[in-house]
Each structure stands twice: as structure tokens, then as C-alpha cells.
Amino acid sequence: MKKVGVAILGLGVVGGGTYKILTDNKEYFKKTQGLDITVEMALEKNVDRAVSLGLAKSQVASSIEEVVSNPNVDIVVEVIGGVEPAKTFVLKALMSGKTVVTSNKELFAKHWPELESEAKKMNAGLFFEASCVGGVPIIRTLQEGMQANKIQSIKGIINGTTNYILTKMANEGSSYEEALKEAQRLGYAEFNPTADVEGFDATYKLSILSSLAFNTKIAIENVHREGITGVSKEDIKYGKELGYTLKLLGIGKNTENGIEVRVHPTFVANDNPLASVNDSFNAVHIVGDSVGEIMLYGRGAGALPTGSAIVSDVIFAARHTNYHYTMFDNSAKGNKETKFVSDFTSQYFIRLSVQDSTGVLSKIAGVFAKHNVSIREVKQVAERDGKVPVVIITHISPESAVNKALEKIKLIDGVFSVDSVIRLES
């Protein structure tokens, strides 16, 4: 039976979950995988925490050098998060010929080329299933299950914090601020929630997923990013009345004009399977030219779901020692020939505040028509404080045309404000 030694860098929520799975299921892995996996040591500042999990004090390292110099350690699991010191630790592990398993999407999205270059040089494994969508096996699906396909699109709810907040706003009529406080109380959102609510977390994940889906390096700078901080409960309410649910989506499309990658609040029709993905759950919808539609769904975060993905990589790495790396140009800037679309085409949900007077709506419609933006639906709400909320749903239109039209509409006498512009996906 093959013996495999593991070191875990960081015993926080995910590191603790990983340790639990590896130790609780040790005999199961012997029986089903033919692997005797042992956690040899952990790098953790809080020694008492490590001991409370079951490690002996002698197994708690105080430096990365202790870890990489241990001949019994074959695989290093990095679950520290952030860029530093995680990057330094991962590079030292790879330079020592250790295989690395990481859940660190920020590190991977920002420094994937450098990490992979070192792994190749040392013939070490580099695995990152847990970096995207928690326990959902999206990375291996793209790498090992979709090779027969040219992937046309990948769309998903890939951040559990924002999905929880938007679900609470939709189901309970909470404001954004109220929903965020509840998410923080339950541990879904950090004290500083910026990475989640401003879309950075989803951007890191979409950079990784779209690179794999479209076989070309998609840097985070190529991803258009918008968060949910500007979303109001009024938008969600009116969208609901029109048959739409609001989600923060990561969207990647491989079109004739180039690749478009974007993270932003998006209305999806209620019959779209993504509309029913609630709370902290995640889901990814993939369209391949051969297989058609595939959807993966599950918990996108948490100690055991993320630990499940990490342990899956540990087992895969132990059983597949002929390591494979990306086949595309995985340099910092990627392939110069890759074209990116910046002027997206979409349907739009537009909410205006207007004066209840004759001719205002016809003037608005005239401006849209002049810019070749076709209106599909108009909803006028009862007057409030002397203003009438008007919701307009457009047909598919270029974003540049919509923005130009809205600049002109703001100048119309009787239009008080353009309150919201939110994209729709079928």
C-alpha cells in the first residue's frame, strides 16, 4: 500500500476541515483508494489549536523550512489564503519538489504562471480544485471531463456570500445593509466584506475557470467587475414582479468576436436553473459544443465542502504522479492573439424616476430608438413623492448604445434620475 505524507499550512476553518477528513477517513482511503495517507505535520502559529485537533506538539512546525525539509512530506496543502506569506511558502514547497494542493484563488489567479513554471521545473504537482466553488468539482470537470468540447459559455453563482445576501433581500425584503449584517453574524461574510461584495472573489474564480474553459490565459485584468453594493431592494422587488431573480454571476462567453468575461449583478428569468440556487450555495452552468448543457451545484464554501475538494486533490495527486500542466500559453500576459470583447451585448433592466406628465415616456422611447435600442417591456409604478418609477426591459443591445442613450435620457425634461442599470441573461 502506498504511503503518502501530508503537511497542512494553516489550521483555520478550511485547514481544520481538511485535517478532519484526512484523519476520520484514513481507513476508508486505505480500503477504497489503496493509499495510507498521514498528516505528518502542520504549519500553525496557534499550537493549542493544532493540539486540540489531534496533532502532537512535535508535529506543529514553526517555519516553512521545517515542512519542506521533512522527507516524509510528499504533499503540501496550502490553506492560508491571501498572497503573502502563502506565495513564498508554496514556491518553497515546489522548489523542494513537493506537490502542492491549494484552495487559494487570489494567489492562483494572480500568480498561476509563476507557480506552474516552478512546478514544471521541479516535476512537482500543482492542484487547485478547492480554489473555485468550494466542494463542487468544477476544475476537474473542465480539465478531465470536457476535453471533447469547445466550451461556448460558462456562467455561475460562484460566491456564496453575495448569493446569501441577495437571497435574503429577495425573500425577506431586507435592505443590502441589513442582509450584509446578517451574513456577517452567521459567518458567511467577513468583518471587511469587500472581496466578496465588490466582486473580487468572483473575479479571481472566473479568471481561473474561464482560462480552463477557453484554453487561453484570462488575467484578472481582462475580467469586467461590478459588485452588489449598489443593489437596492426596489430593484429586486420590481425584477421579481417581472419574473426575474437577481444574482451575482460570473459569465464567460467564447464568441465569434472574441472572449467576454464579466462579473456583475444579473437578472435571470425565474425558469433559469440558476434562479433557484439560494443562500450560500453555488452553481455553474456550462455549454459545450458536443455535450450541450451541464450544471454543477453544491456548497461553495465551508470547512468540510472545501476540505472535500482539497482531499480529492490529495488523493488524485497521490494516484497520478505523471503530472500534467496547462497546454495554453500560461504566461503573465497570456496569448497576445486572444481577442477580448469589451462592448458586451445583453438585455437590460433600467429603472428611472420620472415626472408623471404627458410625453415623457415617448421622449424616452424616442431616444432609445435613435440609438437602435429596442424596448421589450415597460412597467410604470404608482407615483411616490412626486416621482414615478419606470422600469424598462430592452431587447439584446450593445452596451455602448445603451449607455449613450441613457446619457441623453438624463437630459430630458421630466426625467429625475437613472436609478439602476442591470443586465439580464436568458
Image (cartoon, rainbow, N blue to C red):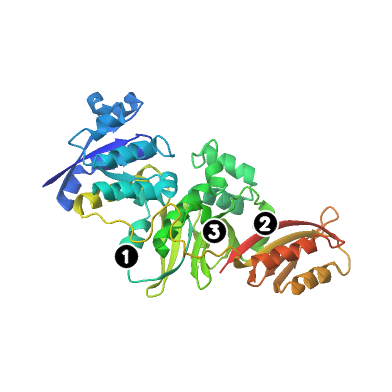
User: In this rendering, is residue 216 above or below 97?
Assistant: below
Residue neighbourhood size for the residue with mark 1, other residues' Cα within 10 Å, grouped as few (<14), some (14–19), many (≥20): few
Mark 3–mark 2 Cα distance, whole angstroms, equals: 20 Å
Q: Earlier in the sequence, mark 1 or mark 3?
A: 1
Residue neighbourhood size for the residue with mark 3, other residues' Cα within 10 Å, grouped as few (<14), some (14–19), many (≥20): many
Q: Secondary structure at mark 2?
A: helix
Q: Between 265 and 215, which is closer to the camera in this rendering?
A: 215
Specify the amino acid type for callout 2.
Answer: Asp
Specify the amino acid type for callout 1.
Answer: Gly
- Residue 94 percent coordinates (x, y): 28, 42
Horizontally, residue 228 falls left or right of residue 103, namely right
Reading the image, the residue beneath label 1 is 145
User: In this rendering, is residue 269 above or below 130?
Assistant: below
Image quadrant occupied by the C terminus = bottom right
Q: Secondary structure at mark 3?
A: strand
x 73%, y 67%: residue: 379
Horizontally, residue 332 falls left or right of residue 171, namely left
The circle drawn on residue 262 is 3
Front tag of 1 and 3: 3
Reading the image, the residue beneath label 2 is 235
Mark 1–mark 2 Cα distance, whole angstroms, equals: 38 Å
Q: Secondary structure at mark 1?
A: helix
Front tag of 3 and 2: 3
Specify the amino acid type for callout 3.
Answer: Arg
